[in-house]
Amino acid sequence: MEKTAVRYRKAETVRRAVIAGVLVSVMAAWSLSSVNAFADSNKTESEAETEVLTTGTDVVFSTDYPGVTVKPGDSSTFTLYMTNDGDTEDNVTLSAEDLPKGWSGVFKGSSTEVSMVHVGAGQTKDASPALSYVLSVPDDAKEGDYTVTLEAKGESTDAKLPLSVKVDKDESDLSAGEFTAEYPQQQGSTSTNFSFSTTLKNNSSENASYALAADNAPDGWTVTFTPSGASAQAASVPVDAGSSSTITVAVIPAADAEQGDYEIDCTAASGKETLTLPLNVTITGTYGMTLTTPNGNLAAKAYAGEGKKVTLEVQNTGNVPLENVQLSSSASTDWTVEFDTSTIDSIDPGASKEVTATVTPAKDAIIGDYVTAITAKNDNANSEADLRISVQNHTTWGIVAVVIIAALVVSLVAIIRKFGRR
């Protein structure tokens, strides 16, 4: 009995140990899964939080000239830009803080007063909408340094731009504009259309419109202004504060302009300043050439296969010598044109030179009129003359026909005399 009782107690002890081990294993597994679930939960929340932090707007509010000097009673215009490095667009409200008493300002989109502006995702400075802030200083403003803060505030945007304004009654005009040309001196003949690339720069803090003119252009000359990107000429051009405009100035001399140097003063005038740009044009001379014959007759007769000499005259109708004048021709097939000289070294103004051209029609040319074009030209002038060549055909049959006709006439006279006596 005692042995049986002992075995029973041992078996009971083993059974309880097994049950305890199973319970411990289950609890350990449950604990591990809870820890993993908690870790996964924390990881998901962390990832979500990171994603939120990496989205949104990153708006920068800027201007090219954040500091200006003005006189009491003046106003200043700040051209504004909004860029966004973020991937979220936003509509922002515009406002100004710290405006001194009596000062005023308005936001403008182009020429319209605005209070809000849309900022696109990834918006660059070039894509920034037209926006400016016009700040007006009262007449009784005291001299000193002031700061006005502009703010752009939206759902996910809070950008600020401080502006430094110095009020100075004795402000010197350090913001004068500039009117310059890349190549202000050019030369050519009277037939040259001169083109000057110019730049008009507004260095002030205000937008301005400049009237363009050339008051001292010589009689018969034409001067026009065409802003960059424009398809038509203009009498004025607007230039934003701190910006510039490229303008092409075209100068066309009078047809009878004499050799010499000419200065043309171009002006760009705004309400506050007049800028002058002198352009210099050198007329090297008037080139002119006429090709004809000494008597002006451009018609001649020729025979098939036989050369016909035609005297040509090259006249210098300009006021400068014509150098290296070349002569050439264009004729019908199998025709030839030869010049006694194909190059004229020089022709003085008002003078002329004669050249002999030998025109030979083709051997099989039929009777009729043909046109042979003669050209005289050099690097500065050219002229063309059309010779009308009338081809005639003389053969031995023509001589025979004349002889036969003469014989018939003689015979007829003899017959009349013989029978007339009877």
Image: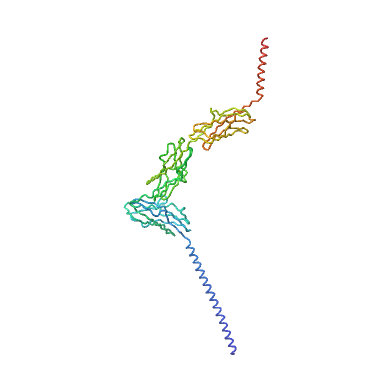
Q: Position of residue 315 (x, y in %)?
A: 52, 32
Residue 95 image-quadrant placement: bottom left
How many discs appear?
0
Q: Which one is nearer the viewer's eye here, 100 or 120?
A: 100
Does residue 401 lie above or below 134 as drawn?
above
Q: Residue at x 66, y 16 (%)?
A: 410
The one nearer the camera, 212 or 135, is 212
Q: Provide residue 174's location: percent of width, then percent of height.
A: 38, 50
Residue 153: quarter of image: bottom left
Q: Position of residue 117 (x, y in %)?
A: 43, 54
Looking at the picture, the colour scheme in use is: rainbow
Q: Quadrant of the C terminus?
A: top right
Query: Extreme left residue here?
Result: 140
In percent of the image, x 45 and y 56: which residue is there? 83
Residue sitting at x 58%, y 28%: 300
Q: Quadrant of the N terminus?
A: bottom right
Q: Nearer the viewer, residue 233 or 116?
A: 233
Q: Is residue 237 left or right of residue 25?
A: left
**Location of residue 358 by image quarter:** top right
Q: Judge by depth and name the residue closer to the eye, 120 or 173.
A: 173
Vertical position of residue 179 compared to residue 364: above or below: below
Vertical placement of residue 255 versus 419, above or below: below
Q: In the displayed image of the protein, which residue is found farthest to the top?
A: 422
- Residue that extends furthest to the bottom in the rendered view of this protein: 1
